[in-house]
Amino acid sequence: ARTTQTSAADAERLAQRLKLRSRQLDTILELGHNGVLAFGADGRVVHANGALLRMLDLERAALLAMDLTAVKALLSARLEPAEPSAAD
């Protein structure tokens, strides 16, 4: 029983440390100047930091509704050179 109590206490301490480290990492990613985008195993966007949202001029909800294919299409469209106008 003592081993179980110690193991449960150790597990709780480790869980708390992991939560703290996760919050620290989230803060670093959110406050950074580089855009950060993360995808889940299913290919859907699970995280986008503020810098990326500003770069793409998108709302967080719009980006979180996308999957990898949609993000690739968005980025490709944004990176294509503009068509020359008739005045050029």
Image (cartoon, grey):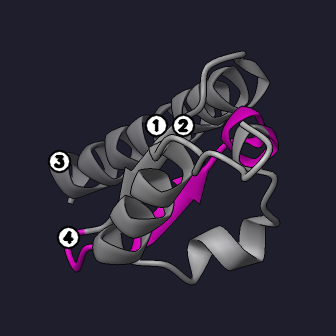
Q: Which residues are the magenta region?
A: 41-54
In-image side of 8 versus 30 (left or right): left
Dot 3: what SS? helix
Nearest to the eye among marks 4 and 3: give it.
4
Single out the mark in the foreground, 4 or 2.
4
Which amino acid, mark 4? Ala
Image: 44 above or below 31: below
Amino acid at the residue labelled 2: Ser
N-terminal label among 1 and 4: 1
Place of residue 21 in the rendered image (x, y in percent of width and height, measured from the top left): 54, 28
Q: Secondary structure at mark 2?
A: helix
Under mark 1, the amino acid is: Leu
Disc 3 designates what residue? 3
All told, the count of numbered labels is 4
Q: Earlier in the sequence, mark 4 or mark 3?
A: 3
Give percent across and percent down for residue 77.
49, 59
Q: CA distance from mark 1 to mark 4?
A: 21 Å
Report which residue position mark 4 lands on.
41
